[in-house]
């Protein structure tokens, strides 16, 4: 009040005697404007202090009380946060440095989103299972736009349950066992094309995984669209981890344009299938794929189907290709383990005898050593470094506040590489999986109701390829086998250049 009185004296009381009423009114208006500006600056300063400079306490929007502290950490630069620090280097270094500095739960900002990262099995269980209803699956908005906002990854409740049921209908063991001959045909075709050549393992595995994914999604009769679909997807992939600047010439803009084109391709495939169904008045024998499941009786819209088809391609292709690339590296670097896998696969051939028939479902259930190699590769490589969740309301965990709307990231890679969970964690040792790991310490496919529904298909296509690769071919690493790159999945340096040749043991096994 004293301050206001002094201001009034300056503008009014300090005026010469006989000043006009107009001058006094102008002074009053100026005073009012000054007070409004002062109040606005104070309010803005308080908001900046609480939300950016020192967000140690957050006000509860319901009760108005001051809630518990946010976890320690740094929010980095405005909007950008620590995005470049995370994606420009080994993410393990980013996580480990902050875990060492702040503990198992810390805050940051990634791709414009305020985030809380958690790196203990208990915290992962809290987010993914115990309180899963409080954390909806989500990615940054830029990634939701790119994959499709109605894709299964971002859903909860009844709609998510419906989508998961439809995906499992196409990808559960009872459905995929019939696909073994077609997957085997793809594997043999690719292996034959690699024989005697130097290849980039990751790029070739991407092509293999893409072809298996498209077979599982569309069946055999939609191959006329495959090349166009692949090219659009490759453009989408290049912009996936770019900053969301939607201006002509940017990777994000090109990716969004490719995404729209992918939607049109899927729409044409659905139209063709409907026409075929109208002509034949029944489902085609090949229509036991994912698209048929989506177009069945549960009445998804075409937009929902397109979002989920594109999302499944993303999930099915790159991760599987990355795992297969790492398997080739680890087996080449561990001859005794490669020998054990080869002997196991050769025994399956001998067991089939002179019939030399194709692989069957029983064969794929009789590969324990190979399965442990896949398990250990998933742990060591930790292709899925983390997953995104979003708090649907403010939640307290371990004395810290997780504010509503913040992203929460369980760090699978840190959990998989903790010596408390896996002794000597950097060593590639498939035998550790002769005993099941402790609960919530092994999460290669996520956990809870949002665990990957396609993990059985992924394992099947790996087993089929490894069966023929180890019994018919040999490979060697080309150049330095050390080094890791991230784009966005962890990969051996340069995609693992290798040389593949026909094995001398083929004739002995009568393959």
Image: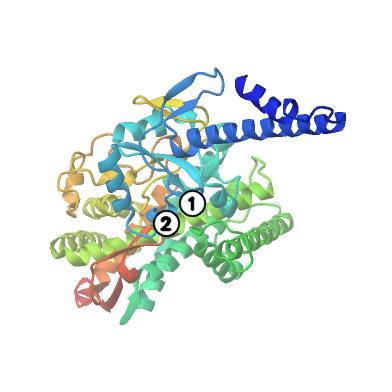
Q: Which of 291 and 260 is in front in this view?
A: 260
Q: What element carries label 2?
A: helix
Q: Quadrant of the N terminus?
A: top right
Q: Which residue is drawn at 30% across and 38% down?
A: 102
Can you give x and y, in whole percent of width and height, for residue 367 in the image?
A: 25, 53
Q: In which quarter of the image is residue 276?
A: bottom right
Residue at x 73% of width, y 25% of height: 13
Residue 186 showing in the rendered view: yes
- Front one among 249 and 379: 249
Give the alpha-carbon distance from disc 1 to disc 2, as whole Å. Answer: 8 Å
**Residue at which label 1 appears:** 80
* Neighbourhood count class around disc 2 (C-alpha, 10 Å): few under 14, some 14–19, many 20 upward: few
Left or right placement of residue 203 versus residue 282 in this view: left
- The residue positioned 30% from the left and 68% from the top of the image is 493
In the rendered structure, find residue 220 and report the number of the disc placed on it: none
Local crowd at mark 1 within 10 Å, few (<14), some, or many (≥20)? some
Image quadrant in which the C terminus is located: bottom left
Q: In this view, does 55 lie above or below 484?
A: above
| For the residues bearing labels 1 and 2, Cβ distance under 8 angstroms | yes
Q: Please identify the quarter of the rendering in which residue 184 is found.
A: bottom left
| Side (left or right) of 404 relative to 411 | right
Camera-side residue: 162 or 62?
Answer: 62
Residue at far left of view: 336
Residue reaching furthest to the front: 17
Report whether 494 appears left or right of 263: left
Q: Label 1, secondary structure: give it.
A: loop
User: Residue 30 placed where, x, y %?
Assistant: 74, 34
| Nearer-the-camera pick, 359 or 455 | 455
Is residue 449 depicted above or below 364 in this figure? Answer: above
Q: What is the x, y in percent for residue 473? A: 26, 73
Can you identify the residue that label 2 sits on? 84
Seen in the picture, residue 470 relative to 140 is either above or below; the reply is below
């Amino acid at each position: 009040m004293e301050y206001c009185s002094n201001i009034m004296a300056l503008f009014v009381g300090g005026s010469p005697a006989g000043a006009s009423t107009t001058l006094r009114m102008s002074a009053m208006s100026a005073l009012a404007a000054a007070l409004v500006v002062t109040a606005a600056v104070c309010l803005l300063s308080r908001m900046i202090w609480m939300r950016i400079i020192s967000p140690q306490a957050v006000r509860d929007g319901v009760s108005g009380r001051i809630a518990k502290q946010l976890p320690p950490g740094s929010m980095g630069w405005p909007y950008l946060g620590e995005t470049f620090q995370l994606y420009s280097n080994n993410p393990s270094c980013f996580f480990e440095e902050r875990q060492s500095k702040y503990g198992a739960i810390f805050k940051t900002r990634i791709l414009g989103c305020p985030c809380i990262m958690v790196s203990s099995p208990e915290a992962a269980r809290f987010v993914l299972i115990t309180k899963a209803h409080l954390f909806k699956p989500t990615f940054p908005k830029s990634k939701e736009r790119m994959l499709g906002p109605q894709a299964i990854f971002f859903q909860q409740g009844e709609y998510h349950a419906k989508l998961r049921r439809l995906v499992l209908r196409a990808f559960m063991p009872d459905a995929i066992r019939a696909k073994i001959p077609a997957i085997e045909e793809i594997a043999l075709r690719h292996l034959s094309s690699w024989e005697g050549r130097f290849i980039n393992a990751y790029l070739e595995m991407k092509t293999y995984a893409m072809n298996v994914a498209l077979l599982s999604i569309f069946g055999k009769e939609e191959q006329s669209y495959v090349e166009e679909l692949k090219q659009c997807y490759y453009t989408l992939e290049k912009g996936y981890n770019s900053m969301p600047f939607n201006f002509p010439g940017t990777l994000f803009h090109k990716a969004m344009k490719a995404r729209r084109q992918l939607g049109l391709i899927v729409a044409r495939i659905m139209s063709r299938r409907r026409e075929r169904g109208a002509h034949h008045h029944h489902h085609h024998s090949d229509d036991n794929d994912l698209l048929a499941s989506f177009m069945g009786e549960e009445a998804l819209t075409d937009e929902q189907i397109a979002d989920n088809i594109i999302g499944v391609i993303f999930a099915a292709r790159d991760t599987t290709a990355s795992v297969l690339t790492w398997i080739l590296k680890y087996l080449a670097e561990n001859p005794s383990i490669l020998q054990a896998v080869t002997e196991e696969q050769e025994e399956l051939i001998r067991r089939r005898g002179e019939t030399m028939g194709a692989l069957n479902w029983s064969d794929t259930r009789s590969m324990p050593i190979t399965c442990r190699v896949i398990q250990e590769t998933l742990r060591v490589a930790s292709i899925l470094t983390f997953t995104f969740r979003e708090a649907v309301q403010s939640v307290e965990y371990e004395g810290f506040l997780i504010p509503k709307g913040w992203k929460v990231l369980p760090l699978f890679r840190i959990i998989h590489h903790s010596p408390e969970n896996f002794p000597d964690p950097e060593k590639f040792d498939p035998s550790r999986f002769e005993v099941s790991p402790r609960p919530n310490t092994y999460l290669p496919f996520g956990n809870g109701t949002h665990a990957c529904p396609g993990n059985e298909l992924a394992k099947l296509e790996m087993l089929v390829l490894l069966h023929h690769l180890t019994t018919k071919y040999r490979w060697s690493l080309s150049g330095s086998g050390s080094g890791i790159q991230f784009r966005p999945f962890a990969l051996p340096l340069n995609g693992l250049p290798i040389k593949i040749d026909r094995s001398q043991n083929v004739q002995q096994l009568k393959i």
